[in-house]
Image: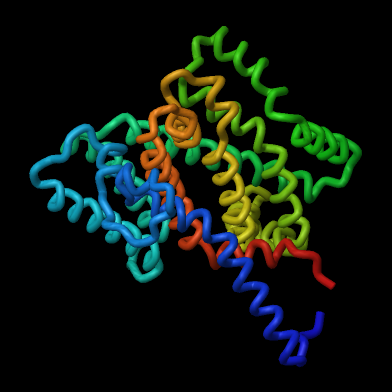
Amino acid sequence: MEKTKNPIVKVAIHLFLIIFTIYSILPFYWTTMQSFKTLKDANSRTPKFIFTPTWENYQELWLNSVPENGYMIMFFILLAVVLLICMALFAEQFPWPNWVTAAFVLLGFAGLLWGIPEVVDTAEFYDYFVNTIIVTVGTVVVSISIGCLAGYSLARYSGYAAVVILIAALGFRALPRLTFILPYYQIGSALNLLDTRFLVILTLVAVNQPFTIWMLRSFFMDIPKELEESAMVDGANRLTAFRKVIIPIMWPGIISTALFSLLLAYNEFLLVRILTQTNWTLPVAISRYTGGEDPRHLTLAAAAAVSATIPIVIVILFFQKNLVKGLAAGAVKG
């Protein structure tokens, strides 16, 4: 597709993109404003764009009580988060392997999530946030681990069984969410797993696995077979060639697939709502405020929605380059 040289067309395209961007951002901008309003300002008949912001909604959402040294604690928490993010961004600058830095960063975030309730009286919404992190990370790790092996096998094997497996996976992917609820509810009831994170992870993996297999297979199909064959000629077995030759090339595709799986698991509502009674995730927790008759729930729902969106925005910005590379690698080449 050639670039247009007509200045009027360029202006029209840019104008359309600006309007579409504003249209897309406006709902989140309005929700963010609502989260910083008092109950009186949020329920005003005339929408208020100029007001005195307040943190009370976020404090009520995340904390049972505000500590006396709250600003000092918040400063150290933000400092720890910034340091861990900087370590992840500049992992290649350290003298040790990248996996050591990644393991340290993951352990640091896990320790931070565990340690915050020890120094701050967190509210129930914090427990829902931790549940969401555990369920999402567990789903992504299991889905990507299985999807890489299955996608690579199906990309390299062209027999009749591969076609059957791919069609079956596509058929399962096309099934509605309600199809999975009853069997997994019965499994959870029989094994005493209802209202546990393990059952939610197991169900979400089953729902999202066909998607990861199909997407990763398309990325593996673009990698020439000669690469692993050359490694096998040099003495490596297939698993070693897969791990040391194919996976490094596939990182952008793996990260792209992992991000889509993350979004599917992070935003899941129906399965989590039915399979759990107390161990909810953020989408289910937010529904407590959006469906209530209490007018105060309006500002709390806005604060909860913003709080649930920020982690996803940070993750997408952090892996933006890998996401673009993965989508470009999987695009149709002409």
Query: Is 221 situated left or right of 99 in this image?
Result: right
Residue 66 locus on image (x, y percent): 16, 40
Q: Is 119 rendered above or below residue 177? A: below
**Residue situated furthest left in the rendering:** 68
Nearest the viewer among 146 and 327 is 327
User: On the rendered image, what quadrant is the C terminus found in?
Assistant: bottom right
Q: Which residue sits furthest front?
A: 45
Q: Position of residue 317 (x, y in %)?
A: 48, 62
Question: Which residue is pictured at 62% across the width and 70% down the height?
Answer: 19
Horizontal and vertical percent position of residue 120: 18, 38
| Residue 232: percent from left, percent from top | 69, 57
Asked whether 217 or 42 is in front, the reply is 42
The image quarter in which residue 131 lies:
top left
Q: Is residue 14 above or below residue 329?
A: below
Residue 163 visible? The answer is yes
Instruction: State the residue at coordinates (58%, 57%).
Output: 244
Residue 252 is left or right of residue 332, and the answer is left
Q: Residue at x 30, y 43 (%)?
A: 57
Vertical arrangement, residue 173 with respect to residue 85, above or below: above
Residue 248 can be seen, yes or no: no
Task: Return the residue nearer the eye: 238 or 80.
Answer: 80
Residue 201 falls left or right of residue 297: right
Query: In this picture, is 322 found above or below 30?
Result: below
Specify whether 63 is left or right of 195: left
- The residue under the point 75% across, 64% down is 331
Quarter of the picture containing the N terminus is bottom right
Q: Quadrant of residue 101?
A: bottom left
